[in-house]
Each structure stands twice: as C-alpha cells, then as structure tokens.
Image (cartoon, rainbow, N blue to C red):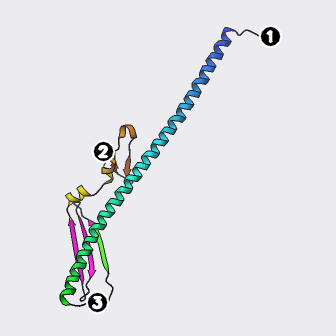
Amino acid sequence: MKITKLSRRQTQIIVITAGLLLFLITIVYSVKTDIKAVARQMDETLKYVKEQCYIYNRYNEASQTKGLMRAIENAQQVNRNLTHTKDEVTKDKLKTYAASIVLEDGSQVDLAAYGRSDEKGIIITFYHTSAEYARNYNLTIQSLLSGYDTYSSGMIVVTDGKNVVASNDENLIG
C-alpha cells in the first residue's frame, strides 16, 4: 500500500470543507432546537390564554346568573306576598323570564318577569348595578392578561376581528 502525501492546498481544502460542514450541522441543530423551544412557548402561552378565558367566562357567567336569580327571587317574593295577602292559590305553572342588559355607561340592569298567581298580570323586578361596581367586580380579558410578562413570555393579542380588545402590552389596545 502506498501512502501519498497531500499537498498543502489539498489539506487546506479538506480542513475548510470539514469546518463548513461542522458549521452547517451546528446551524441546523440550533435552528431545530429554537423552533422546538418557540413551539413549546407558544403551546404554554395558548394554554395560559385558554385557561384565563375559561376563568373569565365562568366567573362572569356566574356573576350574571347570580344577578338574574336575585331579580327572579324578588319577583317570586312579591308574587308570594300578593298571593298570601289575597289568600289564593293557583295550580297553573308560572313562567319566569330574565335578562341582563349592559347599558352604554357600563352599568347593567338585571330584569325578571314573573306571572302572578293570584290574578292576571306580570310582576317585573329589576336590579341595577352601577358602572363602577361592574368595572371593579367583573373580570375582563384585559385584567386576566395584564400580568403576563411580555419580555420572557411573548406578546398576547386578542381582537374582535377589527380592533385589539385585550393584550398584555396595553399600548396595543384600541
């Protein structure tokens, strides 16, 4: 077997080629690692937003239900008082209607209508919640996102299709 000596030029080409190959392998590995890290961060962010939206919906629906139940109970109590006063009892099933309306100033009105049991008629009750109380005690998507750190966790933006309605970067809202 004959061992041939490589020229200096050939040695340089081999070393440069090996260096470039190692460099490319390192870049490909780094890009794949970064893509996996970004995907993992996106999954965590999406999970966080889903949890916060679930909490937001659950809390506000419970609050709205509580207000409507309060209005219904008031209407039923008025009906009981009227029935007791006239000492009449009916076997007809009564219907109850309830609605919650958010007014332009941010306050809300919970309405309930309840059929009278002592005679023909409807009892209507309402409960008004001031705008200040509604702002302080109703969760908003914005309040849920405000604690999410943009530097380490990225930016979250929630839109209604046209406008940004919530973000952990408050400069984007509007």
- For marks 3 and 1, the one nearer the N-term is 1
Q: Residue at x 23, y 55 (%)?
A: 136
Residue for point 59% across, 28% down? 25
Q: Position of residue 53 (x, y in %)?
A: 38, 55
Residue 56 belongs to the span the image colors magenta? no
Q: Residue 145, how many percent across, how many down?
A: 34, 48
Which residue is labeled 2 in the image? Answer: 170
Which residue is nearer to you in this view: 58 or 101? Answer: 58
Dot 1 amino acid type: Lys
Q: Residue at x 26, y 67 (%)?
A: 67
Say if 142 sits above or below 78 in the image. above
User: Which amino acid, mark 2?
Assistant: Glu
Range covered by the magenta-colored residues:
101-128
Q: Is 122 covered by the magenta stretch? A: yes
Residue 76, given in percent of the width and then of the height, sits at: 25, 79
Q: Amino acid at mark 3?
A: Thr
Find the distance from the CA under tag 3 to the CA under tag 2. Answer: 57 Å
